Image: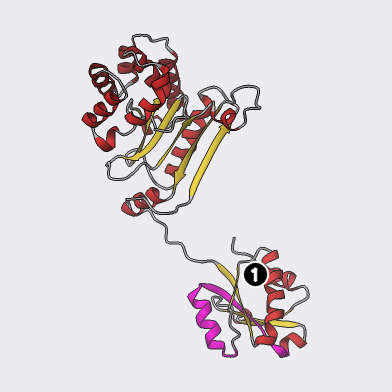
Amino acid sequence: RGRKREHFQWNMDIIGEKSIAAEVELLAAITTFFKSLGVTSADVGIKVNSRKVLSATLELYGITSDKFAEVCVIVDKLDKIGADAVIELLMEKEVSAEAAKKIVASLSLRSVEELEQLIGDASSEAVQDMRELFQQAEAYGFADFLYFDASVVRGLAYYTGIVFEGFDRKGELRAICGGGRYDKLLTLYDPSLPADVPACGFGFGDCVLMELLAEKGLLPELEPQIDFVVVAYNADMKYNALKVIALLRQAGYAVDLLLEPAKKVAKAFNYADRVHGKRVLFVAPDEWVAGKVRMKDLRTQDDSLKEVDLPFEGLVEELFKLKVVPVA
C-alpha cells in the first residue's frame, strides 16, 4: 500500500550547517506538518539512527571501512528479508558468521543507553549525536514522535550521519518519509568545491500519507472554489471572452471557461453548478457592443446582484465596489 508509478514529493534540505540543529529543524518541520493534519505521535513515529552508530558497531566486529557501504545496503534489507537472509548476504561479502550474527543482533538496539553499553564509550561521537538530538527534540516538544532504532540505516550510500524514517505505528504501511545527513554528496557532484559541504534533508511523498489520512478519516473534502464561469454566446464572442478571463485572472479571481459557446442559458448554469462556480459572466453580442458583460450570481440572496450588467472597462473596480472579491 502507498506505492504508485508516480507521486508528488515534498523535499526540504538545509545546506551549510554542521551541527545536529539542522536535523532537529527538519524533524520539527515533519512533526509540525503531521500535527497540522491531525496526525499524532500515537499514529506515526520517526525512527532515528546514525551512520556513525553503524560504523562504530561494525568496527567492534572487525568490519573495515571499505566494506561499510555494501554492508549498509545489506543491513537495510532486514525488515524485508529477515535476519537469516541478511546474515547469509553478509557472509557472502566475507564477513565471518560470528560477526554477521552480532551485527544483526546489534540492530535490535532501541535506546541510546543500549547503544552506549554496546559501544562502551559514552563520549563517542555516535552516542553524543544521538543524545543531543533527543535532548533538543524534547525541548522542541516533539520527542514523543521519535525513537532510536539501530536497524534504520537507509541503504543509500551517501548518508554520513543521522538518518531517519517516518512510519505508521500499526506497521501496515510503507515508510511515510525519510532522510538524513549527506555531508559528502555535494562534492561528489562538484569536485571543484574546496571542501565537503555539510547538508541534510528529507523526502516526503504523498502516497503513503494519503493512505494514512484515509484510514483515520482525516482526508478533507475539498470543493473547487470558482469565482466566475465565463461563457461566450457564440464563436465570434470567444475572443472577447478570453479578454475577460485574462483580466479577471490577473486580478486574482479563480475563473473557469465553458469551452463551447452557449446560447442556451441552462447549459451555462448546469456547467457552473457542476464546477461549483459562484457566478456566470456572459459575453454576448448586444452587451459587448454596449461595452458590457452580464453577470448572474448563482449563490446570492440579494436580488439586486442576481443579474447585473457591468462595464468591461473598469470591470475589476466595479466588482470590488459590489464587494465581489477573489475567493482566495
**What's the image's color scheme?**
secondary structure
Is 19 above or below relative to 207?
above
Q: Is residue 301 left or right of residue 75?
A: right
Per the image, the residue denoted by label 1 is: 324
The part of the image, by quadrant, that contains residue 110 is top left
**Regarding mark 1 in the picture, which secondary structure is present there?**
loop
Residue 1 image offset from top left, x and y in percent: 32, 50
Residue 314 image offset from top left, x and y in percent: 77, 73
The part of the image, by quadrant, that contains residue 219 is bottom left
Q: Quadrant of the C terminus?
A: bottom right
Q: Is residue 74 left or right of residue 311?
A: left
Is 212 above or below relative to 323?
above
Considering every residue shown, the one lying at the far left of the view is 84
Q: Is residue 171 left or right of residue 259?
A: left
The residue located at (51%, 29%) in the rendering is: 182
Residue 82 appears in view: yes
Q: Is residue 59 magenta?
A: no
Residue 104 image offset from top left, x and y in percent: 27, 24
Total marks drawn? 1
Callout 1, which amino acid?
Val
Residue 133 image offset from top left, x and y in percent: 44, 23
Q: Is residue 70 left or right of residue 302?
A: left
Residue 108 appears in view: no
The part of the image, by quadrant, that contains residue 231 is bottom right
Q: Nearer the viewer, residue 175 or 65?
A: 65
Q: Nearer the viewer, residue 71 or 154?
A: 71
The residue located at (34%, 54%) in the rendering is: 214
Mark 1 surroundings within 10 Å by alpha-carbon count, few (fewer than 14), some (14 through 19), many (20 or more):
few
Is 29 above or below relative to 228?
above
The magenta-colored residue range is 263-286
